[in-house]
Amino acid sequence: MTNEDTKQHAPIRQALGTEWPKLGTAIRRHYDLPPNTNTQLEVEGTMDVVLSPIGKAFIIVGRLLDALVPFKGSNIPVTVRNWSTPESTAMFWHRTFRYPGKGPVIFQSRMEHAGNSDIVEYVKFGLGMRMKLSAEGETLRYDSLGYQWGFLRIPDWLLLGTAVIRETPISDQAFQVNFEINHPLWGRTFGYSGRFAFSE
């Protein structure tokens, strides 16, 4: 496959390269949004959110960036909408957490291929988390490589810590997500896990 052919694929597919076909059907469906097109999909699910006191201090600032969520809880209804646009090669994210007794909490970002097996997930003001992708059987795994702002690289330990995300198929129509951030001094600072199914 040529570089030009690869550029026609979604950022996650570009980063995984020959590992892409190993992923489960539900995972490939979730991420295979062609760039430079009007394509979108939506998944619905519930999540459990874990947040340490140290993590909350960071995430209060992070909310200025529409990043992560500032409350813990169990069985929180979540809607995730993904899309691509004709003007961009990125994959866009809009996550809505509906905590009981609170207004909706929005977590927005975009993912771009950063060369080789890396992607960067950007939030407001150009702050991004760089992550290395791999396939663990049918599971998609992300391992954080630090944060970046323009050309500035920021080590994980200066902020919340090192993130590991796993997205595992349950069936052709559903998948499990596990996301955890651990700091070398403070332990787990943030995490969420849950199950999602396609809205269609």
Image (cartoon, rainbow, N blue to C red):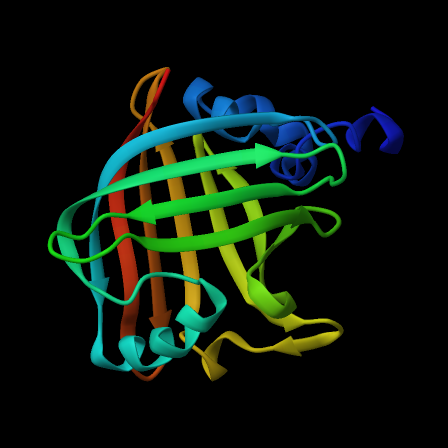
Residue 77, percent from left and from top: 21, 41
Quarter-of-image position of residue 19: top right
Q: Is 133 on the left-hand or right-hand side of 98?
A: right
102 lies above or below 62: above
55 lies above or below 142: below
Could you tell me which residue is drawn at 45 percent across and 72 percent down?
A: 64
88 lies above or below 169: below
99 or 21, nearer to the observer: 99
User: Which quadrant of the rendered structure holds the N terminus?
Assistant: top right
177 lies above or below 51: above
Residue 53, percent from left and from top: 21, 80
Residue 18, percent from left and from top: 67, 28
Q: Is 193 on the left-hand or right-hand side of 179?
A: left
Could you tell me which residue is drawn at 55 percent across and 61 percent down?
A: 123
Could you tell me which residue is drawn at 18 percent across and 53 percent down?
A: 99
Residue 55, percent from left and from top: 30, 75
Could you tell me which residue is drawn at 76 percent across and 38 percent down?
A: 87
